[in-house]
Amino acid sequence: MASPKPTPCIFAEEFLQVARRVVRQRTAAVQTVQRFRLALLLHEQPTLGNAAAAEAVGFSSRQVQRWRRRWSAGDCSVSDREGRGRKAGFSPAGSSHREGHRL
């Protein structure tokens, strides 16, 4: 069974310039570099399958699929969306009536 056709991504030239610059930096965050590398790869090879793209940048094919979908919808960013992941459970001392008096 053939895999579905990859979702095409069209990137603005400014986004691609930022991507090229960040990928060359020595102090950029690893996940940011991976995401920009994926964007550059998909720009250069738009028909590349999710599994091949994932292997090239160190992502899972599901991650590639999610980024492709997001970028094809017009959201050309590499930052995490608000509201994703577990929320912090820490509260400063004294903000909770049960926690403030312990010691």
Image: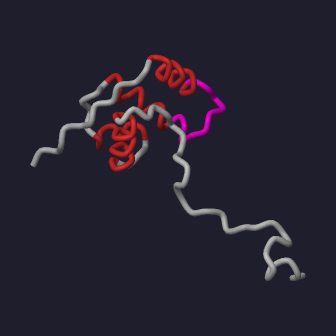
- Residue at figure coordinates x 39%, y 47% from the top left: 63
Where is residue 2? Give x, y as percent: 12, 44
| Quarter of the figure with residue 96 | bottom right
- The single residue placed furthest to the left in the displayed view is 1
Quarter of the image with the C terminus in it: bottom right
Left or right of residue 102, residue 23 in this image = left
Where is residue 56? Give x, y as percent: 38, 37
Vertical placement of residue 49 versus 15, above or below? below
Q: Which residues are magenta?
A: 24-33
Left or right of residue 39, residue 93 in this image = right
Q: Answer whether residue 79 is magenta in the image.
A: no
Where is residue 25? Give x, y as percent: 61, 26
| Quarter of the figure with residue 91 | bottom right
How many marks are shown on the rendered structure? 0
- Front residue of 44/15: it is 15
- Residue at figure coordinates x 45%, y 31% from the top left: 76
